[in-house]
Amino acid sequence: MILNQRKAQSGLMMNNMEKVVKPVLHLDAGHILDNQLARSLGLDKYAYIIQTVQQKDISSDAGFQRIFNSFYIVRRNTEWRECYYKLFERAKKEHYSFADVIGCLYVETGNVEASFTSKMISAINPDKPIWDQYVLENLGLELTGKSPRERISNAIAIYDSIEKWYKDYLLTREAQENVQEFDRRLPSYKWIPAIKKIDYLLWSNRDHEKEYE
């Protein structure tokens, strides 16, 4: 009788162990790695920015501002950020150009903000490029000027050159192959404009080159 009880207990333990070791997770390595790659590039933040920019009041939405600050590394004081996001909302509603925004930012902050102007414009219109130092270096361009007015004028001309560079490059076979590879590796983000995909590759390539300098 004792032997039978022990067998019964042993059988119960085995059943419990079988229940414990039954797989409860369904891992998809491809999906997990794709998401990890996307997060490392900040694609989740970028997607949030361009998908919500038209629905939110940028001047007062703290959540949007926090993600934008994180994604674009905005390290300015509170007063500057208040001016920036109020202008952001106005620029969105009134369809400001790069020239409009950089001029207004100078009037309101006293700074010539070419890079942050382009980031605002690109968030509102994703087909517009970011002011990228890597592209400037390739084009042999540098923002110069003895006065703020001269620097603003030069910045507008340089941004036109950046737009032209992207337009020309996107017609090349290399660009088309790079966009296709981006889509293959990150299929959930195929919808992102081609210009932004190239911007990501330029940014990533620059960081890669710095590792080997």
Image: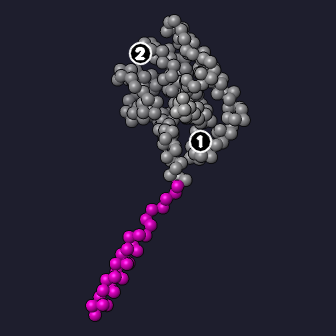
Q: Is residue 45 above or below residue 108?
A: below
In this rendered view, identify the residue nearer to me: 121 or 196: 196
Residue 195 appears at what percent x and percent y?
61, 32
User: Of the residues shown, which amino acid type is indicated by label 2?
Assistant: Thr
Q: Which residue is mark 1?
A: 191
Viewer-proximal residue among 132 and 51: 132
| Magenta-drawn segment | 1-29
Q: Position of residue 206 (x, y in %)?
A: 56, 30
Which of the two labelled residues, at mark 1 and mark 2, occupies the earlier sequence position?
Answer: 2
Q: Main secondary structure of the magenta part?
A: helix
**Image disc number at residue 109:** 2
- Which residue is farthest left? 2
Quadrant hosting residue 172: top right
The N terminus lies in quadrant: bottom left
- Total numbered badges shown on the rendered structure: 2
Crowd around label 1: few <14 · some 14–19 · many ≥20 (10 Å) = few
Question: Can residue 47 be spotted in the picture?
Answer: no
Query: What whole-number distance in Å separates the C-alpha atoms at marks 1 and 2?
Result: 35 Å
Left or right of residue 120: residue 129: right
Q: At 68% from the left edge and 29% from the top edge, which residue is drawn?
A: 169
Which residue is depicted at the point 57% across and 12% down? 154
Q: Give the answer, above or below, for where 45 lies relative to 88.
A: below
- The reply, left or right, for residue 84 in relation to residue 171 is left
